[in-house]
Image (spheres, rainbow, N blue to C red):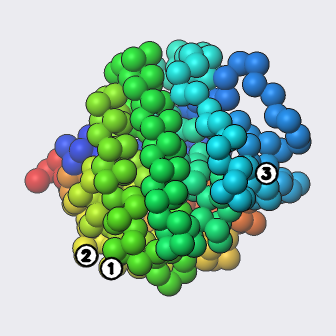
Amino acid sequence: MTSRELCRRAIEFEKPERLPINYPSLGVFDTVMLPYTAPAGWEPSEPGEDEWGAVWLQTDVPNMGQIVKHPVEDWSQLDAYQLPDPNQDSRFDRIEQELVKWPDKYVIAIAETVLTLWERYYSIRGFDQGLMDFYLYPDKAHDLLDRVLEFHIGIMKNLGRRFGGRIDGFLVSDDWGTQHNTLLPVPVWQEFFKERYRRLCNAIHDAGMHAILHTDGRINDLMPDFIEVGFDGFNLHSPTVVGIEEIGRDFAGKTAFLACIDIQNTFARGTPDDVRREAKMLLEHWGTPDGGFIPCEYGREAVGAPEENVKAACEAYQELGIEHCGAAHRS
């Protein structure tokens, strides 16, 4: 069974014959992420600028950086603001070039800058201002969100047209939680985002891909809505923030999880034994006998995790996965 089929079965709860694992730094990986990029010929007007006009500050430590300048910090700048064009074919050339290298892997497409709806919105407006917009300028917020959404729907249509059947999933990235709660009250989130995510998931599915959401923070109260609108899986980096047992009790078997050992706590600060214990808990609580779980690596340098914790996690999942999937096929 190919990596591609293993991951598909895991996400769709069709009893993969082994546990798919994604620890690429150790050469153990069943998924590959391929980004679409800015189109050929695009050049930043200043260092760190992306094609949306947001300016990023990077550090010497490998990480995605932080946005320090926003193109529409004042609404008076909106009329002159031009969103990128999703229909420029050259932005998909890198995916085309890389796809041939991974015929048997489960391929996940992603934006080069990762951001999708909420994160792209606040990259344009600013984080604090973006949160206030939903209360102070709701009409303008709806309009700008629609424009951001239409870009991404255009991307999905082009991925489906150009690669139909060759890309397996799309990773949507929007962090929606603090350490203790959702960024917005659920009713406000529902007003501005629920139906837009439904449209986005529909576009992803129409292009033949699974819809996978990366989101950080305590997003528990949004999970039912996320599942309802069509997300097939969740890429979570901080399982102890959402609660391993709590999430398992409420959502195991209802959606798939592509999860890391907790990057804030266990992975960064724990011992290899701590990592192995958490791996066992995650597989037991978030996986099911039919699938639903794909363990994923996080770049250790970004969070200061020791190399031995990467090895401990991968080895634990390799060992635990034998019994986990074996039991499913014996049942």
Question: Can residue 37 be seen?
Answer: yes
Lateral position of residue 91 relative to residue 216, left or right = right
Q: Residue at coordinates 59% horizontally, 46% vertically from top-left?
A: 114
**SS for tag 1?**
helix
How far across and down, in percent of the image, does residue 221 sit? 34, 75
Q: Residue at coordinates 33% horizontally, 59% vertically from top-left?
A: 194
**SS for tag 2?**
helix
Image quarter of residue 76: bottom right
How far across and down, in percent of the image, does residue 101 sit? 56, 19
The three-letter code of the residue at mark 2 reads: Arg
Residue to which mark 3 is pinned: 56
Dot 2 and dot 1 residues touching (CB under 8 Å): yes
Mark 2 is surrounded, within 10 Å at the Cα level, by few (under 14), some (14 to 19) or many (20 or more) other residues, namely few
- Is 153 drawn above or below residue 69 in the view shown? above
- Is 13 drawn above or below residue 6 in the view shown? below
Residue to which mark 1 is pinned: 246
Residue to which mark 2 is pinned: 249
The three-letter code of the residue at mark 1 reads: Glu
Image quarter of residue 5: top left
